[in-house]
């Protein structure tokens, strides 16, 4: 009987020690997580992202998912549109006076695009640039000091994704998110075999010609509504 009691007490002691050990692990983990969070706060480590609404001519800066700033911008002209899509900042520089002293370069595949200042302050609020996003010089300096390399930059223009506010006629030499979407579609359909760049060059002309011929479309180098529809695009996508 005495032996059984001793074994029972020993089991209770072991169970208690196990529970204490588990609690210590949880407490220790909590302290580490809390300490890291406190360090991040003290060090100013926040997740920033940028949303640019071309149709609104606004740039929105988000910190940890919350919009903390909004700035007026100028966007690309209709014939030189700003690059719609999801990008990130891959270059930062303190450039010359014509760029307002600051440059935030984006990883756009079909050209050199970025966010910068301007000597033409009156262009802000209009579609006036060669495709880049212009800001007031005081605003780009402030933004430059906040964001870092790798910051996501989302550019939107209307409800139709890469087609912005609707289909535009594409001609050789054009570039943009809509050209990229056409290349990807023709690649999926087996007509376009080269790298997808977002630039309308000879390889896309050749692919378009074969596609039009196979689908009974008018043979031309301009991509029009009939071509978009035959590829399966709809403006409401």
Image (tube, helix red, strand yellow):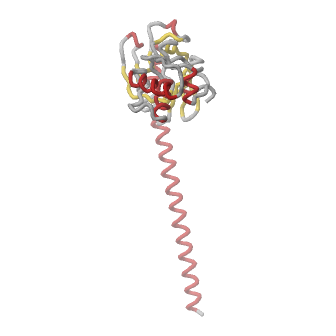
Residue 216: image location, x then y, percent:
54, 25
Farthest bottom residue in view = 1
Q: In the picture shown, does residue 40 fall above or below 236?
A: below
Quarter holding the N terminus?
A: bottom right
Residue 20: image location, x then y, percent:
54, 67
For the point 53% across and 11% down, the residue is 127
Numbered circles on residues, count: 0
Residue 223: image location, x then y, percent:
51, 20
Q: Nearer the viewer, residue 119 or 189?
A: 189
Q: Nearer the viewer, residue 217 or 123?
A: 217
Q: Nearer the viewer, residue 201 or 76?
A: 201
Q: Does residue 104 appear left or right of residue 237 in this picture? A: left
Quarter holding the C terminus?
A: top right
Residue 230: image location, x then y, percent:
56, 27
Q: Nearer the viewer, residue 171 or 100?
A: 171
Farthest right residue in view = 236
For the point 59% across and 18% down, the residue is 55
Q: In the picture shown, does residue 120 fall above or below 63?
A: above
């Amino acid at each position: 009987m005495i032996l059984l009691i001793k074994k029972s007490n020993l089991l209770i002691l072991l169970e208690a020690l196990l529970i204490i050990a588990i609690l210590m692990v949880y407490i220790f983990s909590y302290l580490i997580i809390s300490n890291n969070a406190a360090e991040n706060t003290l060090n100013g480590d926040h997740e920033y992202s940028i949303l640019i609404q071309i149709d609104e001519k606004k740039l929105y800066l988000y910190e940890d998912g919350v919009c903390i700033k909004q700035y007026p911008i100028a966007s690309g002209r209709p014939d030189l549109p700003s690059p719609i899509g999801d990008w990130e900042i891959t270059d930062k520089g303190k450039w010359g006076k014509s760029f307002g002293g600051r440059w935030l370069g984006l990883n756009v595949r079909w050209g050199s695009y970025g966010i910068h200042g301007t000597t033409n302050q009156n262009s802000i609020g209009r579609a006036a640039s060669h495709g880049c996003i212009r800001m007031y010089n005081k605003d780009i300096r402030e933004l430059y000091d906040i964001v870092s390399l790798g910051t996501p930059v989302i550019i939107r223009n209307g409800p139709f994704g890469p087609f912005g506010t609707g289909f535009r006629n594409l001609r050789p030499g054009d570039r943009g998110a809509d050209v990229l979407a056409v290349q990807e579609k023709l690649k999926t359909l087996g007509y376009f075999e080269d790298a997808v760049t977002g630039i309308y060059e000879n390889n896309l002309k050749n692919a378009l010609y074969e596609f039009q011929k196979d689908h009974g479309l008018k043979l031309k180098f301009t991509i029009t509504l009939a071509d978009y529809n035959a590829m399966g695009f709809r403006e409401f996508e």
